[in-house]
Amino acid sequence: MSSFSNPDVVSGYAARTAQLVPGLHDLHRMTGLLLAERAPADARVLVLGAGGGMELGVLAQMQPRWHFDGVDPSAEMLQLARTNLGAQASRVAFHEGYIDSAPEGPFDAATCLLTLHFLPEEERRQTLRAIQQRLKPGAPFVAAHHSFPNEGAELDKWLARYAAFAAASGAPISLTANSIRTMKERLPVLSPAMDETIFRDAGFSNIELFYAGFTFRGWVAYKS
């Protein structure tokens, strides 16, 4: 069973994520502002990794005429999104699965927050190409995830900083220790330079870093 099917993990997702991701709520607002620079007032937006509904809620509040397609592999996390969105859920078409479960579009904008770091490099490439193919020409795409130097002493240094932030935010020491162990053993983190290379290879251009919070990076890019 995926951890995102565990009832305890699902119920505590929002509070736990806010403890681990510096400036999480500001990240969501910045995402909305960046998308709105090019997306029309009645935009159709693809949200990959929509479980929980946090970014969906912020985007829906910022843009009352946008409609969304939210994709996530966890049925439990999608149900949490429906619950948290309340009446706004009527503006979202939910799809259980991965990027191949998303409609073909074309979409006016897309986001993928705190998701791509779970994907090995080749799967990440395939996912980004699939997102790009579903966008209208020039449409904005915002991504944010773990991205930091991932070898030797640099890896340990950045993981220590991640742990220190989580602890200072009130995360239990056991959670922090488990997160570091999991990241070292199983999370296919790439360096920021490699992430940007993959964005370009997938057909995105004008790639700009707009967010950096210890181990997390966020970019806005546009379909070429």
Image (tube, rainbow, N blue to C red):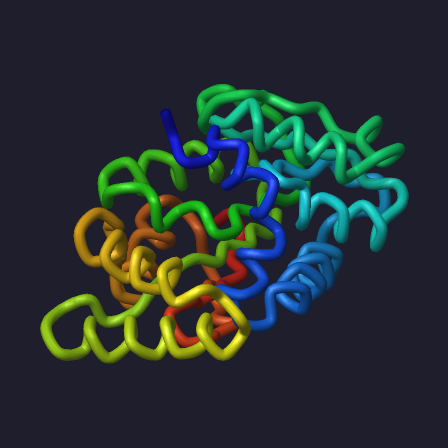
Decide which of 23, 123 is in the foreground and name it: 23
| Picture coordinates of residue 168, whole percent (x, y) | 49, 79
In this rendering, is residue 206 above or below 138? below
Q: Quadrant of residue 93?
A: top right
Decide which of 93, 165 is in the foreground and name it: 165
In this rendering, is residue 211 above or below 63? below
- Tell me the residue at 62%/51% (across/down): 14
Q: Quadrant of the N terminus?
A: top left
Please identify the residue farthest to the left as the structure is shown. Answer: 152
| Picture coordinates of residue 30, whole percent (x, y) | 67, 66
In this rendering, is residue 47 above or below 167? above
Decide which of 197, 167 is in the foreground and name it: 167
Q: Quadrant of residue 67?
A: top right
187 left or right of 13? left
| Picture coordinates of residue 26, whole percent (x, y) | 67, 69
Is residue 2 in view? yes
- Tell me the residue at 44%/51% (across/down): 204
Is residue 138 in view? no
- Tell me the residue at 32%/34% (across/down): 126
16 left or right of 180? right
Q: How many marks?
A: 0
| Picture coordinates of residue 31, whole percent (x, y) | 65, 59
25 left or right of 187? right
